[in-house]
Image (cartoon, helix red, strand yellow):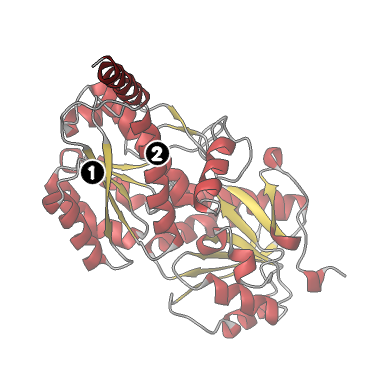
Amino acid sequence: MNSFMRLLAAASIVSAGTLASAPVFAQQAPIKIGVPTSIQLQVGRDTQNAVKLAIEEINGKGGVLGRKLEMVVADETENPEQGIAAIKKLTADDKVNVLIGGYTSGVTLAQLPHISAAKTIYIGVGAASPAITAKVKADYNNYKYIFRAFPINAAHQARALVDFINGKLKGEMKLTKIAIVGENAKWVQDLVPILKKGATDGGTDVRMAEFFDTSTSDFSPLFAKVKESGAQYLIVILSHASSDIFVKQWHDAQVPVPIGGIDVKSQDADFFTRVGGKANAETVGLFAIRAALTEKTIPFWDEFVKRYGTAPVYTGVGAYDAVYVYADAVKRANSIEPDAVIKELEKTDHTGIAGKMVFDEMHDVKTGPGLQNLLFVQWQKDGQRVVVWPKEAETGKMIPPPWMSN
């Protein structure tokens, strides 16, 4: 009998120890985070992995209001109809408490009325069109649910590109003639007029500005026009078109014009390898890189790489921060009711991975010193990524393409 009691006591201690080492959640339903994203793309995979990482960290510390966070994913592809179906599934069928995701501006714009009708908070981490959050200002009561945590919008990106053109290209490198080419997509249509005007006002000669179809597979006619224009630098703006084909053809044709700008798929950590090193000397706009942007950047970066085997693209950075921003707002509101949480989200002052996150009156993330900004990073030898602009963030010198280095 004594032996039995000793065993029972030992079992009780082990059990108590196990309970003490794990968070104890109240018997309430989990808080569901719906993730609408393009699951076949790197932006979608990184969105999911970042949400998963943030959820594990938060649940490991007791969750939110004593409740677990749980992720539910829906594939919005890059198609508006599929995007709407994803929102309806997550809000009506899965009854999620918040939506964190998005990638294509055209898809997000199509989803907005359905998000509004569902009265569900949406925190975008992928789509850049200013038209998305403009709805908040135009019709607050219906669209107050919409926030953009990442990236900075296309107009802010255009101004950052203008700074790169006038500061780096014209100011430092004395390259005064540029061409602009971009895919025919909503966010690019928003960006190019601002970019063209800003460059021209800064004294840069814009020799051509042209859109191309996202399904383009032969860029040789476009490169010929750029060369004929006399441009000394080619600003590229693309996300949905094939970056791999574009860069390979630029390299293989040895186009005598350096390229740089916003090329979303070339932000992927494996891009340099994927194109066989042909991205050497391409300069890419990035919202975060493994550098001490804040005290959280490097720890997050290293943990993400350790877990998933690749560096995060921008949607991963935004999604991780968005989970924390939502969780913090719920804690402050002491509620998951949308109206209460919205009021707290509007007060957000969160130090994130890429900088401080603060929302403006349109629920759009702000940019500026100490906030989230666009960095210009150049692919160099052996797939190194070197920050070349802005000047205060520089980690190395900008190089010309190998065939132009003599």
Calculate the distance from the C-alpha at mark 2 to the C-alpha at mark 1: 33 Å
Image quadrant where one finds the N terminus: top left
Q: Which mark is residue 188?
A: none
- Residue identified by numbered label 1: 138
Within 10 Å of the Cα at label 1, are there few (<14), some (14-19), or many (20+) other Cα atoms? Answer: few
**Residue 211: x, y in percent?**
48, 72
Relative to 230, 225 lies left or right: left
Q: How many marks?
A: 2
Relative to 356, 250 lies left or right: right
Relative to 35, 262 lies left or right: right
Question: Farthest residue toward the right?
Answer: 406
Q: Which of 164 and 262 is in front in this view?
A: 262
- Residue identified by numbered label 2: 54
In this view, the mark in front (2 or 1): 2
- Looking at the rendered structure, the secondary structure element under dot 2 is helix
- Residue 187 seen by the camera: yes
- Residue 226 seen by the camera: no
Image height check: is 8 above or below 103?
above
Q: Tell me which label, 2 or 1, sits earlier in the chain.
A: 2
Q: Which of 229 and 336 is in front in this view?
A: 336
Q: Nearer the viewer, residue 11 or 96?
A: 11
Within 10 Å of the Cα at label 2, are there few (<14), some (14-19), or many (20+) other Cα atoms? Answer: many
Image height check: is 110 above or below 333?
below
**Residue 88: x, y in percent?**
15, 56
- Looking at the rendered structure, the secondary structure element under dot 1 is helix
Question: Farthest residue toward the front?
Answer: 1
Residue at the (56%, 36%) spot, across then down: 299
**Residue kind at label 2, given as amino acid type:** Ala
Residue at the (31%, 34%) spot, across then down: 326
**Residue 83: x, y in percent?**
25, 62
The answer to which image quadrant residue 15 occupies is: top left
